[in-house]
Image: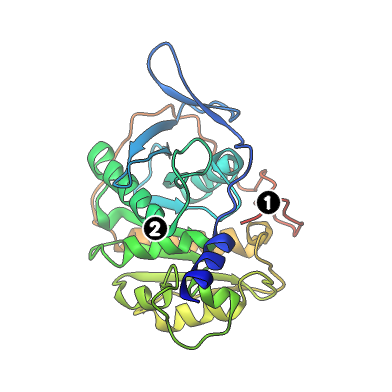
Amino acid sequence: MGNVTSNVAARFAFFPPDPPTYEVKKEEDGRLVLQGVPADKNMDVHLLDTKGGNKIVATFWKHPIARLTLLYSHGNAADLGQMHELFTELRSHLRVNIMSYDYSGYGASTGKPSEINTYHDIEAVHNCLKDKYGVKQEDLIVYGQSVGSGPTLHLASRLKKLGGVVLHSAILSGLRVLYPVKMTFWFDIFKNIDKIRHVNCPVLVIHGTEDDIVDWSHGKRLWELAKEKYDPLWVEGGGHCNLETFPEYIRHLRKFIKAMEKLSITKPAKQLTSTPSIAETNHCKCLRLKTKRSASTKES
């Protein structure tokens, strides 16, 4: 029964877009670009080798005066081609660098999606942030949306000097999404309910009160179990796929980022080589970050 239940949970967890929404191409100068995604001079594309033997696609979105970097693990039915508008808006509004990636088997990443592969994936991305960009734990915030909360808490539970964690529509575990079990079974996947106890930095939980995919109780329990609780955001009327469309989402997230900046090492922000053309807007233009509520067309 354990193997059967685990397989059911795994099937629930992974829905990579088919076909992928982009391709990786190499320019004449050797740079990698995402074909199908608008060009951005402040975005680097990487192909990273993982412990699982796969090559995953990662993108680093640079902000010229960022102090913090957001490592974003997206939801279960999206790839990087669908997320680029959100990343450009978050970069602008939050004034952070953003590193994101596609799990094994998602987008142009090779291999098959699985729990263990997502752990290998995020570890490879974190190594890239350390080795190529010199990002320290204290200046890093890991952000997990939906199933992305699994690799996010896997990494967060291992980094003792991490700056912060954001859990967006997060799950307690894969099995708990399907059944109201009261204990953790060995065959469960993404045991966030156990890993949250080992996180030693501020944790922001964001969850919609009308989430019909991952019940609000998941977010509330994760917040209760966090050692260092930051004021949670319970989005009234929010579902599983549309929290970015509520104005309180970006306001609260910006407040959290500013608080984490104050806690970070007090030194000048690292200047990254970039084209200083990122507009600091006072309103949101992206469909995913509107000042009025609207329905989202993307799954998380």
Can I make out residue 279 in this image?
Answer: yes
Q: Secondary structure at mark 1?
A: loop
Task: Say if mark 1 contacts mark 2, CB within 8 Å.
Answer: no
Most extreme residue toward the front is: 1
Residue extending furthest toward the bottom:
182
User: Which SS class for mark 2?
Assistant: strand
Sequence-first tag of 1 and 2: 2
The x, y position of residue 177, in whole percent, is 57, 74
Task: State the quadrant of the C terminus.
Answer: bottom right
For residue 202, side relative to residue 283 (left or right): left
**Residue beneath the point at 48% across and 66% down:** 167
Instruction: Name the residue rendered at 44%, 84% in the picture.
Output: 224
Question: Which quadrant holds residue 169?
Answer: bottom right
As drawn, 221 above or below 11: below
The residue nearer to you, when weighing 114 against 98, is: 114
Mark 2 burial class by Cα count in 10 Å: few <14, some 14-19, many 20+: many
Give the number of the mark in front: 1 or 2.
1
Q: Residue at x 53, y 72 (%)?
A: 5
**Residue 225 at x, y = what percent?**
40, 82
- The amino acid sitting under disc 2 is Val
Horizontal side of residue 73 vs 213, given as left or right: left
The percent coordinates of residue 27 (x first, y second) are 45, 15
Q: For marks 1 and 2, give the CA distance.
A: 22 Å
Identity of the amino acid at label 1? Lys
Classify 111 as above or below 68: above
Q: Which mark is residue 174?
A: none
The residue depicted at 34 percent of the width and 80 percent of the height is 227
Q: Is residue 169 visible?
A: no
The numbered dot on residue 142 is: 2
Provide the residue designation for mark 1. Answer: 298
